[in-house]
Image (spheres, rainbow, N blue to C red):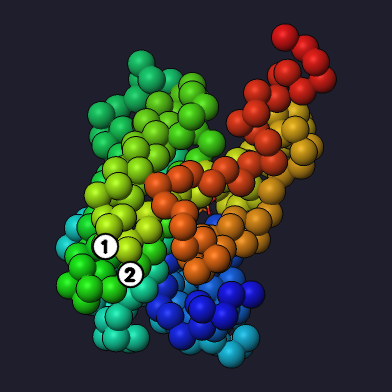
Amino acid sequence: MYDDLKGKTVVVTGSSKGLGAAMARRFGAEGMNVVANYRSDEEGARETVRAIEEAGGAAAAVQADVSKNECVDALFDAAMFSFGGVDIWVNNAGIEVASPSDRKSIEEWQRVIDVNLTGVFAGCRRAIDHFLDRKMPGVIINLSSVHEIIPWPHFADYAASKAGVGMLTKTLALEYADRGIRVNAIAPGAMNTPINAEKFADPEARAATERLIPMGYVGAPEDVAAAAAWLASDQASYVTGTTLFVDGGMTLYPGFQFGQG
Ligand code: NAD
């Protein structure tokens, strides 16, 4: 637990389920005010809010499609209305769609980029403007992926968006470091969330994924939530512009694990 987080306000995009819900709950447990954003799954977001409130925290569910800039502004306004300010902004919402690149429509490509990259930029922009306006330090955490650096056939849009998130994170970190604004990314590997539910329902597909993880098992959403809490806290006060990989070693060239190569 991080005492300095208590009473601060955090916005977590896409927190109706998966990693966003786990991070929102962890922030609630840290005593923070949590703005739990959702796009369409109102019940999921309400569930996240309920869990935080039952644990004694304060939270509000706010609908917004992060791929639309006016919705991101409205999300920020709702956070201001509920809690009077924002200290930490987590750009978590993301989507993935599989299709061979020669068959991928421009519309599909654009949708993924709009949510995963432009949506992240819109959130960063809004939060940074607020931090500068109040002359306050602030923290931004962007959800990247191991596909920030690992190519992924059939997911060219997703991989390109996550590589973009990595460079966006570094660039903004450099641009605002002297104003006390820290910008970092978390790159999860294979985690047990709804985005992977279909794949992991098939034991063979799950085993194939596990072979790519040197630690040998799929991660839990709480692993990412723990990294997010640390990055948000003053314990990480000298950390900016980095991508923290939470991947059980997936980016360590697992094919070389037992001396091959
Ligand atoms: P998920 O599908 O379980 O949840 C994604 C969340 O984002 C949902 O709440 C969804 O409603 C929300 N969302 C989607 N589009 C949105 C939009 N336009 N506006 C607002 N909210 C929107 O996914 P997850 O596994 O929890 O992944 C969360 C993030 O972590 C994503 O950015 C994903 O790319 C990244 N990630 C996940 C994994 C993994 O293995 N689960 C691995 C690497 C990276």
**For mark 1, does the 10 Å Cα neighbourhood hold few (<14), some (14 to 19), or many (20 or more) residues?**
some
Q: Secondary structure at mark 2?
A: loop
Q: Position of residue 214 (x, y in %)?
A: 75, 33
Amino acid identity at mark 2: Pro
Q: Residue furthest right?
A: 258
Left or right: 54 as drawn, with respect to 32: right
Q: Position of residue 246 (x, y in %)?
A: 61, 46
State the quadrant of the N terminus. bottom right
Residue that appears at 59% across and 75% down = 2
Residue that appears at 54% across and 46% down = 244
Q: Earlier in the sequence, mark 1 or mark 2?
A: 2
Residue that appears at 35% across and 46% down = 169
Q: Quadrant of residue 35?
A: bottom left
Q: Which is nearer the eye, 28 or 111?
A: 28
Establish if 88 lies above or below 93: below
Q: Quadrant of residue 168?
A: top left
The residue that mark 2 highlights is 137
**For mark 2, does the 10 Å Cα neighbourhood hold few (<14), some (14 to 19), or many (20 or more) residues?**
some
Establish if 122 lies above or below 258: below
Amino acid identity at mark 1: Arg
Q: Which circle marks residue 61 in the picture?
A: none
Q: Secondary structure at mark 1?
A: helix
Q: Position of residue 26 (x, y in %)?
A: 59, 71
Q: Which is nearer the eye, 56 or 111?
A: 56
